[in-house]
Image (cartoon, helix red, strand yellow):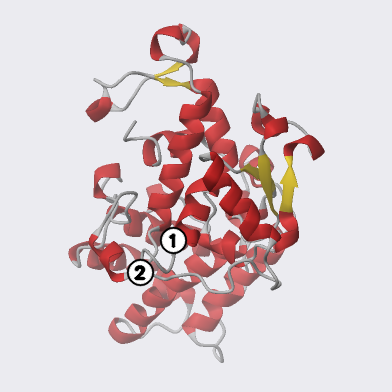
């Protein structure tokens, strides 16, 4: 699908950008990203509203830069300054992750590939600024006030967007649902059904994992809720990635086999800086990836289980 009429004399550059992004968002609605990658035409589609918002935000900076420095009136005219824009962002000290997002947004806008632009630094885990451990900002929110919230998150691993949409009737017992993520003891577990706010809109059942007291607290929080949402307010200062990491480790340790009992074909060896640590169990890693709501096991391995 070719994007036409990207420029119009009566439209601002940002309006032209939004026209292109919305066209690709509408075209991608309900379609399979995987299938379009196989077909080789995925650059003509946007498959997630959150992706659309991210690209729009990054491209608004690009439009402002073009307006202030090059006075271009159409996207075609602005195309020649993409490399200059990326270089400017790099000189401003933007992270490798932000730069990759900038390039991805431009690729989606113009139907290019990353090879069409100047290379950007390699993304490395050690340079990620968002935390999955205790950080300074944790001191600025009340541990006592949000104790239930913290326990709830560390027993479910839900994202903030999923918690905002969580209704009290989404609590299920394992005996009433199918074996999710091939959890051996699923009939003895409580689950939360995630239907809104998930990444890519994917629905899933999340097992509640913790001590008996922690699990009971989560169950009681759901059962005793008298509002339409379990958490009408979400604390901004909460370190959600740390909570998800705690949950991921609980889930992994529950089902992982001892390192010396893992068959060679099921061993997942660590990245270079963690090579001295024992290998992970691929089967348990797969379960963790599913319950976290990720499609790639590498995400769980690299970003949530690195401390094991």
Q: Position of residue 272 (x, y in %)?
A: 25, 26
Dot 1 lies on which element?
helix
Label 1 or label 2, whichever comes before in sequence order: 2
On residue 147, which mark appears? 1
Q: For the residues marked 1 and 2, what is the alpha-carbon distance in whole angstroms?
A: 8 Å
Dot 2 lies on which element?
loop
Rendered position, 69 above or below 273 = below
Q: Is residue 124 visible?
A: no
Residue denoted by label 2: 142
Find out whether the residues at labels 1 and 2 contact each other: C-beta distance under 8 Å: no
Compared across the picture, whether 232 is left or right of 245 comes to right
Residue 189, by quadrant, is top right
The structure residue drawn at horizontal position 48% and vertical position 79%, both measured from the top left corner, is: 74
The structure residue drawn at horizontal position 70% and vertical position 64%, both measured from the top left corner, is: 167
Compared across the picture, whether 2 is left or right of 72 comes to right
* Closest to the observer, 291 or 42: 291
Q: Residue extending furthest front?
A: 213
Q: Residue extending furthest bottom?
A: 10
Q: Position of residue 35 (x, y in %)?
A: 68, 41
């Amino acid at each position: 699908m070719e994007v036409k009429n990207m420029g119009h004399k009566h439209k601002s550059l940002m309006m032209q950008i939004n026209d292109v992004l919305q066209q690709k968002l509408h075209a991608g609605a309900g379609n399979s990203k995987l299938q379009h990658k196989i077909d080789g035409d995925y650059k003509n589609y946007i498959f997630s509203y959150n992706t659309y918002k991210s690209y729009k935000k990054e491209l608004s900076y690009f439009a402002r830069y073009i307006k202030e420095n090059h006075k271009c009136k159409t996207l075609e005219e602005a195309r020649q300054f993409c490399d200059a824009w990326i270089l400017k962002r790099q000189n401003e000290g933007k992270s490798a992750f932000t730069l990759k997002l900038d390039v991805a947004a431009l690729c989606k806008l113009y139907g290019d590939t990353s090879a069409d632009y100047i290379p950007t630094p390699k993304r490395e885990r050690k340079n990620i600024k968002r935390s999955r451990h205790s950080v300074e900002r944790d001191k600025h929110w009340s541990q006592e006030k949000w104790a239930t919230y913290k326990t709830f998150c560390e027993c479910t691993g839900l994202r903030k967007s999923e918690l905002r949409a969580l209704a009290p009737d989404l609590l299920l017992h394992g005996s009433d649902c199918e074996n999710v993520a091939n959890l051996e003891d699923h009939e003895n577990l409580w689950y939360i059904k995630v239907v809104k706010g998930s990444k890519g809109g994917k629905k899933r059942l999340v097992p509640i994992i913790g001590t008996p007291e922690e699990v009971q607290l989560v169950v009681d929080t759901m059962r005793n809720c008298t509002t339409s949402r379990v958490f009408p307010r979400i604390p901004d200062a909460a370190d959600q990635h740390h909570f998800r990491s705690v949950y991921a480790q609980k889930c992994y340790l529950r089902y992982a086999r001892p390192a010396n009992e893992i068959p060679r074909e099921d061993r997942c060896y660590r990245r270079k800086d963690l090579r001295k640590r024992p290998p992970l169990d691929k089967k348990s890693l797969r379960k963790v990836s599913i319950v976290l709501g990720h499609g790639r096991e590498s995400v769980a391995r690299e970003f949530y289980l690195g401390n094991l």
